[in-house]
Amino acid sequence: MSRDKNYQRLLNSPRWREVKTQVWRRANGLCERCIREGKAAGVPDGYITPGVDCHHIKPVESGRTVMEMEQLCYNPANIELLCIPCHIKTHQEMFSHTREKVKENKQRARQRFMEMNDPHYQPPSDSKPTD
Ligand SMILES: [Zn+2]
Ligand SMILES: [Zn+2]
């Protein structure tokens, strides 16, 4: 059984519905990121954004076993209630984060390679990251 299938199964269970209700109550039905960023009521041009999506802070798919996935999926501390724009933003940030990491690792490997092959190699002081 693939991880994806396991994930689907986790989200189709009555337990997930319970966890979602629990998270929704904790957040009073509001987007927790909007609140964190001060976009909640009471702030001068603030407003209340209802939360609609449950976002897993640490992706459920990152669990190595079904049990680990279950723990990530059903742990309210790993879940944030978000509005759709915040959910999209959060995933874009996660994606650019991993992309940055990949780029960083590649650059480090390139640097090491050059240093190894040329003992006089000096990285140019005004070097800009290129890709
Ligand atoms: Zn939001
Ligand atoms: Zn999400």
Image (tube, rainbow, N blue to C red):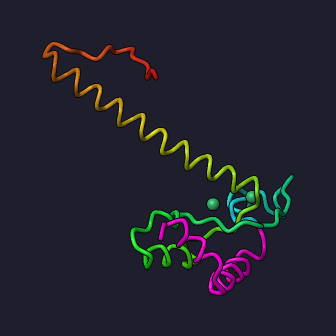
Q: Position of residue 68 (x, y in %)?
A: 43, 75
Q: Residue at point 45% right, 63% down?
A: 62
Q: Left or right: 108 with respect to 50?
A: left
The quadrant where ligand 1 appears is bottom right
Q: Is residue 11 above or below residue 36?
A: below
Q: Is residue 32 left or right of residue 40?
A: left
Give the camera-side residue of 59 and 77: 59
The residue located at (45%, 20%) in the rendering is 130
What's the magenta region?
Answer: 1-30
Q: Position of residue 17 (x, y in %)?
A: 69, 82
Magenta stretch: residue 6 in it?
yes
Queried whether the magenta region covers residue 35, the answer comes back as no
Residue 20 picture location, percent across and down: 68, 78
Q: Main secondary structure of the magenta part?
A: helix
At horizontal 69% and vertical 60% (from top left) the residue drawn is: 33
Q: Pick whichever, 45 or 86, lies toward us.
A: 86
